[in-house]
Amino acid sequence: MPEPQNNLTPQDKPKFHRGSVLTIFKTDRYEDLMALFLSLLIALGVYLVVK
């Protein structure tokens, strides 16, 4: 079976855009930290309700 050829040049490769222009946070790192904090709050809330 022949190997597939990768004929893409650097200009042809798809670009990955992280995040959105519609964010309310200044940086991606701050957004990630806030998501972590909120997920910990939700987990704590579920733990306290189920307990």
Image (spheres, helix red, strand yellow):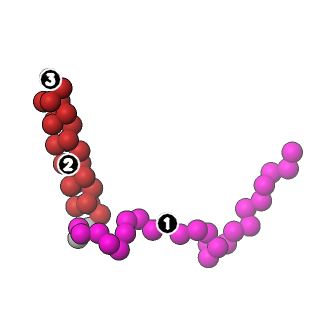
Nearer to us: label 1 or label 2: 2
Q: Kindly identify the residue that appears in the image at 41 percent across and 65 percent down.
A: 18
Q: Kindly identify the residue that appears in the image at 29 percent across and 63 percent down.
A: 28
To which residue does mark 3 refer?
51
Dot 3 amino acid type: Lys
Q: Residue furthest top?
A: 51
Chain-order first, disc 3 or disc 1: 1
- Whether residues under marks 2 and 3 lie with C-beta atoms below 8 angstroms apart, the answer is no
Q: CA distance from mark 2 to mark 3?
A: 20 Å
Image coords of residue 37 (percent x, y): 18, 48
Dot 2 amino acid type: Leu
In the image, residue 23 above or below residue 5: below
Question: In the image, which residues are magenta?
Answer: 1-25
Image coords of residue 3 (percent x, y): 80, 51
Q: Residue furthest bottom?
A: 11
To which residue does mark 1 refer?
16
20 inside magenta stretch = yes
Q: Quadrant of residue 51?
A: top left
5 inside magenta stretch = yes
As helix, strand or loop, the secondary structure at mark 1 comes to: loop
Dot 1 amino acid type: Phe
Q: CA distance from mark 1 to mark 2?
A: 26 Å
Dot 2 alpha-carbon crowd within 10 angstroms: few under 14, some 14 to 19, many 20 or more: few
Q: In the image, which disc is placed on residue 38?
A: 2
Q: Residue furthest right?
A: 1
Q: Kindly identify the residue that appears in the image at 86 percent across and 45 percent down.
A: 1
Question: Relative to the observer, which residue lies in front, 43 or 10?
Answer: 43
